[in-house]
Amino acid sequence: MKVLSIHTQRWWMSVLCTALPLTVFSQVTPEELANNIGYSVPVSPAFELLPGKPSEVTSLVTPKDIMASVPTFISKDRVKTGVAADIRPFSYLVKASLSEYQGKAKWKQALWRTVLAIGTAADPTTKNDAFLSAGLRTSIIDKGDPRANKAYTDSLSSAYARGLASLPPPTLGMTLEQAAQRAAQVNKKGMISADSVRKLFNKNSWNKFRLDMGVAFMARAINGSYRSDSLKGDRWGVWIATGIPLGENAQFNVTGKATHSIRPTTEQSETSRYVAGGRFRIFMNNNLAFSVEAAQLWANYSKSTSLNETWTHFAAIAELNVPALGGWLTLAYGGDSAHRSHTESTFAFSYAVTTNRIFTK
Amino acid sequence: MSNITIIPINANGEPISVTLAIPNFPQSIGGVVWRFNADKTFDVKAGLFTTTAGEVPLGAPSVVDDKIFLVEGAVIHHNDNPPTPYQVVVTITQNGKIIHTEVPSENGSGKIGTDNVPFLYRFQLVS
């Protein structure tokens, strides 16, 4: 890919400097515009339903971890709030070596990649109730799964063994701490650095085809009790997203989301929201990227259908590295179409100069 | 220092080999098997092992009798978040038959996230 010449960049800058003062600008920054919809399944769908995302998530791996975590979540007959954990629930059930994982049984890959998350939060309105949310996330298809790529895993394994073999022989009585120090030296000593193997893989696999799905269900624990007669279904959500490669430097994303409130409290309570959208991104080179996205949103109110509303989200964003500005110049046009709850919404221009770029592969 | 596992071998049998594998979890491993003399001084590098080439030939019984082997390896991470379980299995064979199998006590099983996890295993072959 060609980098824009200095003359071309100056021409664009002069056009911008002329045009920008005449333009209607949005209060929404390009970054906010780009992150408004989200074209991937949340890392932890369970936490999307909670009123506040947990600040710390405990990772559980072994059955022993699970048993040890029980007191973290409950105390006597009450749910403790503000705690969260995640685990790969099928990691002990897959029963596959790496070569079996890389074989034809793709369902084993999907099971292995599945993550279950559980989180709790206090109900900010009633104070006494607690929310208990559980969700699953999986990559049904992931052509960029590093573990499924035999050439990549072989490279890593060989690089490590060769690196270790190039070190002086250890003493027979070497401790695990000393072994860890030697392991840290391996990447430096290896003929092929494992880190460079990883970076190359990530560079080449960023837009491989993938299909992700997430589901979550949240219950309200009346007065914080986890007894079955005190747990009431409150909300559920479903997310699906796909990434489709378009050559080496572009990607098309399609997403669909649905969240539904089982027990709306007032007529003004939103009972369901659906989102469907698509995004196209292209990285022209290391200094220039474009993104265009459009989504339709529906908000429904089952107790008062006259409040139902629908609107369109649109964003077109260009991101250019301008060393003279000390970072990235981002130009955007978009926003949400006007709708009942936001009658002033409109599409508008915005721009920002930032140290870090918005778009990453 | 951790114990050295004593493994009886048939002095008149065929060559012996050690295999490193993670049979029940899709994890990668790599490492080296180092050979030491009975007085614990370093002898030679017996061989390298990887995920797809986990077998390291150790030699004929006459060569390896009384030798001590140190398996120095690591489970190679795949940036797992949340972490995932692993269990390394060491298998020693002679005449095509398994004469010993064991999970190393030093990090031979556990969890791996975003860093390689080193493991160690020591054994001595005695006829």
Image (cartoon, coloured by chain):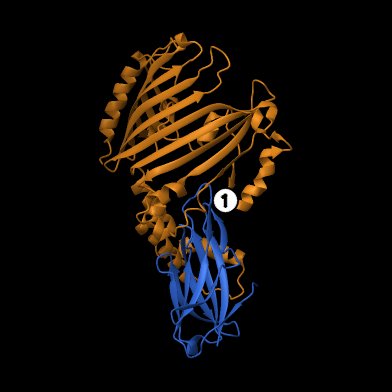
Chain colours: A orange, B blue
Q: Is residue A181 visible?
A: no
- Please say if A75 is above or below A306: below
The residue that mark 1 highlights is: A61
Q: The N terminus of chain B is located in which quarter?
A: bottom right
Of A178 and A278, which appears nearest the observer? A278
Q: Is residue A4 visible?
A: yes
The answer to whether residue A226 is left or right of residue A338 is: right
Residue type indicated by callout 1: Val
Percent across and percent down for residue B14 are 44, 86
Percent across and percent down for residue A11 are 27, 27
Of A329 and B104, which appears nearest the observer? B104
Q: The C terminus of chain B is located in which quarter?
A: bottom right
Percent across and percent down for residue A172 are 59, 76
- Please say if A117 is above or below A159: above
Secondary structure of the residue carrying numbered label 1: loop
The answer to whether residue A170 is left or right of residue B3 is: left
Chain identifier of the residue bearing label 1 in the image: A
Q: Residue at x 46, y 49 (%)?
A: A112
Of A84 and A171, which appears nearest the observer? A84
The answer to whether residue A39 is left or right of residue A64 is: left
- Please say if A194 is above or below A143: below
Percent across and percent down for residue A110 are 42, 47
